[in-house]
Image: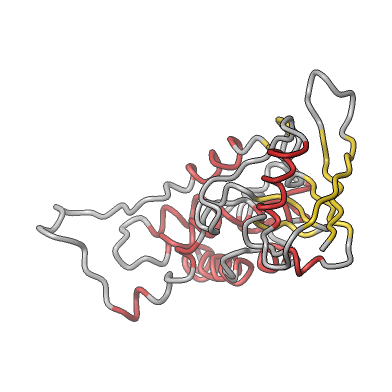
Amino acid sequence: MEMRFKITRFAPGVDEKPYYKEYGLEAEPGERILDCLNRIKWEQDGTLGFRASCGHGVCGSDGMRINGRCALACQKLVKEYEGEEVVIEPLPSFKVLKDLVVDLDPFFEKVRLMKPYLIADGAPPARERLQAPEESKKVDVAIRCILCACCMGSCPVVNENEQFLGPAPLVWAFRFIFDSRDSRSLERLKAVDYPDGAHACANYFECTRSCPKEISVTKYINRIKREIQMTLNEGEK
């Protein structure tokens, strides 16, 4: 089928402001949007900039806004946009480095602030730290996060307040706050208990809708809020 693409182009220091450039190509219904971008770059315009790596929804590199919705280009199929013009833009709220490539350093810094690794007291066991299945289930969906930043680009609060910690970092906080093997749950709760932390979430649910891994992001943030209320606020009474 004939597909029409309208792609944001912008090279800082060269272009005064972003603009759209249109491309057309024949594509099969089962092809991915990423396949189309690759073909545009290889066959029509080698200057087009975008990120991609594994191409299988694992690395999270190719997050972008497609027809108004943040998503992974490798997970979206041509048949989903049959008869439409496909408008592709960089993830909102991030500084554009070139075309569809955005600066993710501030995002990863927020994730690092969450200390996204297990912290356990005592000497390490000979083999591994065991966890009961019922305890593992508390975080087994949260661990799917691939740091694609689609939730960050979708979040209205992030778009208005760059100081907001954001949904993905809070998912990583959740993953360790509720991990029975971690010894720093209280410390982690205190780290997100501030106006631009968990409390800034306004329950728009856009993060949940855009998550390519179907993580209930808003639900987990609200779980953190309730835990703060029960553990920190009520504990001070």
Q: Residue at image x 67%, y 48%?
A: 164
Q: Residue at image x 74%, y 30%?
A: 47
Residue lying furthest bottom: 134
Q: Position of residue 163 (x, y in %)?
A: 68, 42
Q: Position of residue 188 (x, y in %)?
A: 44, 54
Indicate whether 130 appears above or below 190. below
Indicate whether 111 appears above or below 86. above
Q: Position of residue 16 (x, y in %)?
A: 89, 23
- Is 122 left or right of 3, judged from the image as shown? left
- Is 9 left or right of 215, judged from the image as shown? right
Residue lying furthest top: 13
Residue 67: quadrant of the picture: bottom right
- Say which of 143 and 76 sits in front: 76
Q: Residue at image x 73%, y 56%?
A: 70
- Is 211 left or right of 184, judged from the image as shown? right
Which colour style is shown?
A: secondary structure
- Say which of 143 and 74 sits in front: 74
Indicate whether 5 appears above or below 128. above
Q: Residue at image x 71%, y 42%?
A: 162
Look at the image and tell me in which quarter the N terminus lies.
bottom right
Q: How many numbered marks are there?
A: 0
Residue lying furthest left: 126
Q: Position of residue 236 (x, y in %)?
A: 49, 63
Indicate whether 10 appears above or below 6. above
- Is 233 left or right of 177, judged from the image as shown? right
